[in-house]
Image (tube, rainbow, N blue to C red):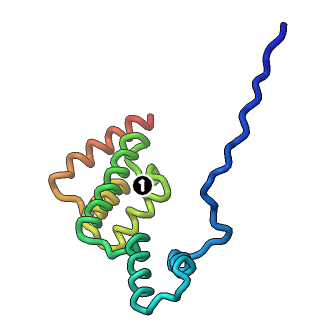
């Protein structure tokens, strides 16, 4: 039995040259123009670069609320899958939850107390839910 071997074609070199060294966009513009930039042009280029990079900005109330919602969602999902315990959370979301508790976030405090079994911050409406959750986990342990 014979087979025909077809070689792969050689790659075609790109017509665009890659820069030999890393250089800032401002330095590239200066080399292309052949003249130095004025301080105003340098400041404008820096502002444009900072806008493109997206420097960190302080969190808004919406950002904080979204973060709290995400952490609580992860905590509830972990509790459903692994049991109602603080240890059921993975280490990073657990750290986020405890950091939110240190900041005094009320939602995080309630979730932490629910996971640890403490009832200091739990509203009276959730007392039945906590008791039912404890009965379920004790029956599952048997």
Q: In which quarter of the image is residue 34?
A: bottom right
Residue furthest toward the top? 1
- Residue under the image location 24 percent in, 65 percent down: 62
**Foreground of the two, 38 or 23:** 38
Residue furthest toward the bottom? 39
Instruction: Say which quadrant the N terminus sits in.
Output: top right
119 in relation to 48, above or below: above
- Residue under the image location 43 percent in, 59 percent down: 94
Which residue is label 1 attached to?
Answer: 86
Apparent side of residue 27 relative to residue 121 in the rendered image (left or right): right
**Foreground of the two, 58 or 78:** 58
Q: How many marks?
A: 1
Residue furthest toward the right? 1
Residue 109 percent across, percent down from the top left: 30, 64
Residue 32 percent across, percent down from the top left: 54, 76
**Foreground of the two, 91 or 142:** 91
Q: How crowded is mark 1: few (under 14 residues within 10 Å), some or many (20 or more)?
A: many
46 in relation to 71, above or below: below
Q: Is mark 1 on a helix, strand or loop?
A: helix
51 in relation to 142, above or below: below
């Amino acid at each position: 039995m014979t087979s025909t071997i077809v070689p792969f074609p050689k790659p075609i070199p790109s017509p665009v040259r890659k820069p030999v060294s890393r250089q800032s966009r401002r330095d590239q513009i200066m080399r292309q123009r052949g003249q130095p930039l004025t301080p105003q042009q340098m400041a404008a280029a820096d502002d444009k670069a900072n806008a493109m990079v997206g420097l960190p900005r302080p969190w808004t109330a919406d950002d904080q609320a979204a973060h709290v919602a995400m952490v609580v969602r992860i905590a509830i999902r972990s509790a459903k899958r692994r049991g109602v315990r603080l240890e059921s959370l993975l280490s990073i979301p657990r750290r986020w939850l405890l950091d939110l508790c240190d900041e005094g976030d009320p939602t995080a405090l309630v979730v932490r107390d629910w996971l640890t079994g403490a009832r200091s911050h739990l509203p009276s409406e959730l007392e039945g839910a906590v008791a039912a959750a404890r009965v379920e986990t004790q029956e599952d342990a048997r």
